[in-house]
Image (spheres, helix red, strand yellow):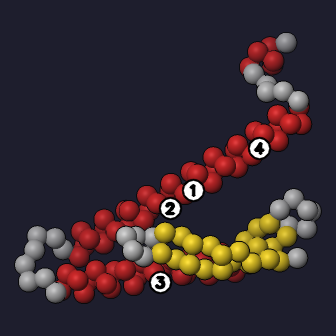
Amino acid sequence: VARSSAVTLDLLSGASIAATARLENLGNGEGVLLSTADMNSLLEHEWRCLSKKYEELTAALRSRTAGTITFAEVALITTLRHTSDVCWHYAQSVDYVEGMLRSQLIAAIGKEVTPADFAE
């Protein structure tokens, strides 16, 4: 069984990616997963949005008659900001999954296990 979910990824100041991804049932009743085709589609869309942003920045820099900043510097800053956002979202996702697994483990065992429990 497949279902759709709207996904919005914030990119750079003012730019965002909005896409609809198809989430596929894993078949074991345990959850859903993005298909490879949908993941590739999201990555291609991300690249198109970044390319569009670079074009906008190039046009903005051309309209300036004088300045101390070049496109290479602006592209680097833009790319690093985007990379930082991607890393932050990845860390948040990992924290969420770890918290969920921890809660499930505590529920299964019936208590929170500490290093002292292993010494027994």
| Mark 2 burial class by Cα count in 10 Å: few <14, some 14-19, many 20+ | some
Q: CA distance from mark 2 to mark 4?
A: 23 Å
Q: Residue furthest left?
A: 66
Q: Quadrant of the N terminus?
A: bottom right
Q: Are marks 1 and 3 in contact (CB under 8 Å)?
A: no
Residue 39: % across, % down:
65, 75
Q: Earlier in the sequence, mark 2 or mark 4?
A: 2
User: Is there any visible trace of residue 8 in the rendered image?
Assistant: yes
- Look at label 3 and name its amino acid: Arg
User: Relative to residue 72, is residue 30 drawn left or right?
Assistant: right
- Look at label 1 and name its amino acid: Tyr
Q: Which residue is mark 2?
A: 86
Q: Looking at this view, is 110 or 54 the one in front?
A: 110
Look at 83% across and 62% down and name the residue there: 31
Q: Earlier in the sequence, mark 3 or mark 2?
A: 3
User: Relative to residue 36, is residue 48 drawn left or right?
Assistant: left
Q: Earlier in the sequence, mark 1 or mark 3?
A: 3
Q: Which residue is mark 1?
A: 90
- Could you tell me which secondary element the residue under label 3 belongs to? helix
Q: Which residue is mark 3?
A: 48
Q: Residue 51 sits in which quadrant?
A: bottom left
- Could you tell me which secondary element the residue under label 2 belongs to? helix
Q: Which residue is mark 4?
A: 101
User: Relative to residue 60, is residue 109 drawn left or right?
Assistant: right
- Could you tell me which secondary element the residue under label 4 belongs to? helix
Q: Residue furthest right?
A: 28
Q: Are marks 1 and 2 in contact (CB under 8 Å)?
A: yes
